[in-house]
């Protein structure tokens, strides 16, 4: 099983690609594809047919996944690398820049 240092609910910054510099909250992590969905970033237009839930149909904007290597955790407005260390009997994530627990 893969272990990612970024979790759902974290605020991340995009490091590469068309949306470089954008920030948003992680909505979902797709472990099998090594990708993340970030709120308000990498929006795509999806054409939908009319249905019971959407009787009008039309064009819907939604987030597309980004590769997890293209995002970094944000702490105090800056992108930081994340590490793990054991404090007592617990394993904790920490910022490698400030050496503080996240």
Image (cartoon, rainbow, N blue to C red):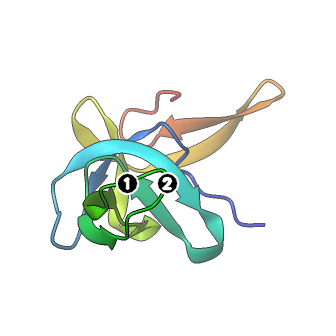
The residue lying toward the viewer, choosing from 84 and 50, is: 50
Q: Quadrant of residue 64?
A: bottom left
Q: Is residue 85 above or below residue 30?
A: above
x 41%, y 50%: residue = 81
- SS for callout 1: loop
Vertical placement of residue 4 versus 2, above or below: above
Residue 56 sits above or below residue 9 on the image:
below
- CB atoms at circles 1 and 2 under 8 Å apart? yes
Q: Position of residue 59 (x, y in %)?
A: 23, 64
| Image side of residue 69 versus residue 47, left or right | right
- 94 relative to 51, above or below: above
Q: Quadrant of the N terminus?
A: bottom right
Q: CA distance from mark 1 to mark 2?
A: 6 Å
Q: Residue at x 60, y 57 (%)?
A: 4
> Quick check: 18 left or right of 46?
left
> Which numbered disc covers residue 37?
none
Identify the element where label 2 is drawn. Answer: loop
State left or right for residue 97 relative to residue 88.
left
Callout count? 2
Give the percent coordinates (x, y) of residue 17.
20, 73
Q: Nearer the viewer, residue 54 or 44?
A: 54
**Which of 39 and 97 lies nearest the eye of the viewer?**
39
- Percent coordinates x, y for residue 69 in the rendering: 42, 69
How many residues crowd mark 2 within 10 Å: few (<14), some (14–19), many (20+)?
few
Q: Which residue is mark 1?
A: 55
- Residue displayed at 53% across by 43% down: 8
Alpha-carbon neighbours of circle 1 within 10 Å: few (<14), some, or many (≥20)?
few
Q: Residue at x 57, y 76 (%)?
A: 33
- Give the x, y percent position of residue 41: 25, 55
> In the drawing, what numbered circle is on residue 52?
2
């Amino acid at each position: 099983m893969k272990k990612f240092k970024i979790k759902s609910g974290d605020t991340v910054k995009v490091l590469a690609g068309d949306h470089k510099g954008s920030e948003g909250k992680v909505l979902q992590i797709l472990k099998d594809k090594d990708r993340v969905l970030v709120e308000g970033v990498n929006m795509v237009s999806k054409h939908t047919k009319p249905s019971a839930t959407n009787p009008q149909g039309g064009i819907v904007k939604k987030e597309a996944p980004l590769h997890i290597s293209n995002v970094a955790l944000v702490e105090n407005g800056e992108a930081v690398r994340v590490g793990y260390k054991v404090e007592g009997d617990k394993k904790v994530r920490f910022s490698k820049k400030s050496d503080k627990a996240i």
